[in-house]
Image (spheres, rainbow, N blue to C red):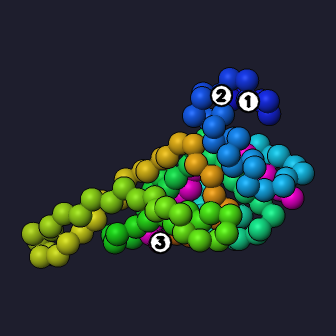
Amino acid sequence: MNSFDWRNATPEQINLWRYASGLIVYTTITRLYFLGAIAGSEYLTYNAGKLYIALECGPVDNILPVDSYIAVYNQANVVSSWLSETRPYWDVTAAAVRYVNNPCIVKNIYFSRIDNVGYTQFLFNGYRLNV
């Protein structure tokens, strides 16, 4: 998947492209690769004129010992799914529930924005469609 014509795409990626690109009347396509801090990133802000098509994306670490997640919003700014790979365990020394938060990379998804609790880093590899 190294070109705008998607010649090397899998059938799943082609279906995603056909569906997601029909959701917005776009004028520009921008290739994006992002691995960095979620805070202050463009992925947190809703804009009806943009849509992200992710070949892979997700949280890659966390800072809080709590149940962490990333909420994924569709083009209508409504939560469509949650990205989380949290495992609770009982800490016998503290006599409390603790959480182990692991990377949760998903493939072939589209969204308009994300919301974050507990994770600090975000990975995005895909395209942004703009009006």
Could you say whether the residue bearing mark 2 is in a helix, strand or loop? Answer: loop
40 on left or right of 83: right
Q: How many marks?
A: 3
The quarter holding residue 69 reads: bottom left
Q: Residue at label 2? A: 9
Label drawn at residue 117? 3
Mark earlier in primary sequence (1, 3): 1
User: Three-letter amino acid code at disc 3?
Assistant: Val
Mark yes or no: residue 33 visible.
no
Quote the CA–CA distance across marks 1 and 3: 34 Å
Q: Residue at x 78, y 56 (%)?
A: 24
Q: Residue at label 1? A: 6
The quarter holding residue 93 reads: bottom left
User: Three-letter amino acid code at disc 1?
Assistant: Trp
Q: Residue at x 46, y 62 (%)?
A: 82
The reply to whether the C-beta atoms of the residues labelled 1 and 2 are less than 8 Å apart is yes
Mark 3 crowd level (few <14, some 14–19, many ≥20, 10 Å Cα): some
